[in-house]
């Protein structure tokens, strides 16, 4: 009586189809150690701040089988709960940091399935709690919550085609800030994976993002290696069904053509954004950086101004104004408005009732 039978049937049928589709990958991940005992119940009510650090508690212990699964299935509960409670940016940050730290790209392919399963579990729990309530208002709230989880579960199973967006521009133009804001609204929540050239460069050198590289490390040859790595990782992520944002200067025409070709080869949509900012604004941003992955200085910016960028056929964006205005302009320019609103409708729910 809580759920529409048609929605339940659609969800069950789609979940079975996706499980069969990903079966070979799941078996391979079991053999290679990605299926293991985890927390098993990793939603926000089972995480606290202890001495300033997020600490997990109340793991599934009464039945070890329920706590064994793919590491992404464990993570999916946290991602789903963040989304359900209205925290899409935080969900996107968690996913991006997990992928960056683990390097586990292949395991992303069934993520939509795992997210749907986690949402369907909460739908079942909320519906079951109705039977323990006698107050009409509480029953109605739980029913609404259960239906919201079911809608969320269905939305995870109906993702749009992945997309590739590349953001270019000289240092200090605002590429990274824009990428972080666009990521949660690109593709199905929790959104796009962000590949930043500064971070990739440090990773290839065996450094953490905040460690500095000597100036003589920034050669044409090393940059070609970095851009090649960006393209390879973007292609691998797109192949899993994830949308991708690539954050790099992209000053040379061949660099812009090569990243666009990644999407073309996959038969997917590509949008290039070229950010323009007054020199002094960019310089101020560079001087204000703290603990940032970029090693660029104002002197580097001066050098970049002499680059032969050629004809830029990407969307030209004035990135000197407020970030909110820039985001709204780009959402309209590259067709993110309708996509984001559709996703928001599917994932909207009352906060704090899960």
Image (cartoon, grey):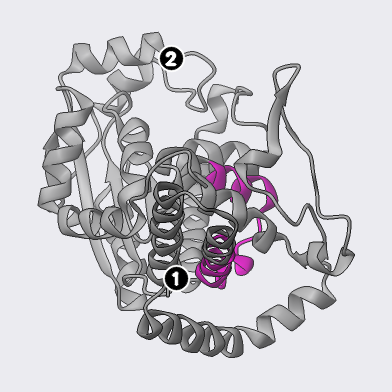
Residue 303 shown in magenta: no
Question: Image check: 132 left or right of 227?
Answer: right
In the image, residue 219 sits, relative to residue 173, either above or below, namely below
**How many marks are shown on the rendered structure?**
2
Q: Nearer the viewer, residue 233 or 242?
A: 242
Q: Quadrant of residue 40?
A: bottom right
Q: Position of residue 101 (x, y in %)?
A: 67, 45
Q: Quadrant of residue 339?
A: bottom left
What residue would you read off at disc 1? 241
Crowd rating for badge 1 (residues with CA inside 10 Å; few <14, some 14–19, many 20+):
many
Q: Nearer the viewer, residue 252 or 20?
A: 20
In the image, residue 118 sits, relative to residue 85, either above or below, namely below
Question: Image check: 328 left or right of 140?
Answer: left
Q: Main SS of the magenta segment?
A: helix
Q: Residue at x 20, y 38 (%)?
A: 327
Q: Nearer the viewer, residue 70 or 57?
A: 57
Q: Which mark is residue 289?
A: 2
Q: Secondary structure at mark 2?
A: loop
Question: Image check: 284 left or right of 128?
Answer: left
Q: Quadrant of residue 22?
A: bottom right
Classify the position of the N terminus by image quarter.
Answer: bottom left
Q: Residue at x 50, y 68 (%)?
A: 112
Residue numbers of the magenta segment: 94-122
């Amino acid at each position: 009586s809580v759920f529409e039978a048609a929605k339940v049937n659609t969800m069950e049928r789609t979940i079975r189809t996706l499980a069969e589709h990903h079966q070979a990958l799941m078996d391979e991940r079991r053999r290679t150690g990605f299926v293991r005992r985890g927390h098993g119940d990793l939603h926000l009510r089972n995480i606290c701040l202890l001495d300033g650090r997020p600490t997990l508690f109340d793991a599934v212990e009464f039945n070890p089988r329920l706590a064994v699964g793919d590491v992404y299935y464990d993570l999916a509960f946290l991602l789903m709960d963040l989304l359900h409670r209205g925290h899409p940016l935080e969900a996107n940050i968690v996913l991006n940091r997990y992928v960056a730290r683990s390097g586990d790209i292949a395991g992303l392919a069934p993520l939509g399935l795992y997210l749907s399963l986690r949402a369907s579990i909460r739908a079942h729990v909320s519906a079951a709690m109705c039977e323990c309530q006698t107050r009409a208002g509480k029953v109605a709230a739980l029913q609404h919550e259960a239906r919201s989880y079911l809608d969320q579960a269905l939305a995870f199973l109906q993702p749009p085609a992945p997309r590739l967006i590349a953001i270019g521009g000289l240092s200090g133009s605002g590429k990274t800030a824009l990428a972080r804001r666009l990521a949660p609204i690109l593709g199905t929540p929790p959104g796009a994976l962000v590949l930043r050239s500064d971070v990739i460069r440090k990773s290839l050198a065996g450094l953490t993002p905040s460690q500095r590289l000597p100036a003589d490390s920034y050669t044409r040859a090393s940059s070609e290696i970095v851009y090649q790595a960006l393209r390879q990782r973007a292609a691998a992520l797109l192949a899993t069904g994830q949308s991708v944002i690539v954050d790099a200067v992209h000053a040379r025409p061949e660099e812009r053509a090569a990243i666009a070709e990644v999407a073309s080869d996959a038969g997917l949509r590509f949008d290039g954004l070229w950010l323009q900012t007054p020199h002094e604004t960019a310089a101020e941003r560079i001087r204000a950086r703290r603990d940032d992955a970029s090693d660029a200085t104002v002197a580097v910016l001066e050098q970049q101004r002499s680059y032969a960028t050629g004809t830029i056929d990407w969307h030209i964006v004035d990135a000197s104004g407020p970030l909110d205005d820039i985001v709204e302009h780009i959402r309209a320019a590259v067709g993110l408005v309708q996509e984001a609103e559709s996703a928001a409708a599917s994932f909207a729910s009352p906060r704090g009732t899960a």
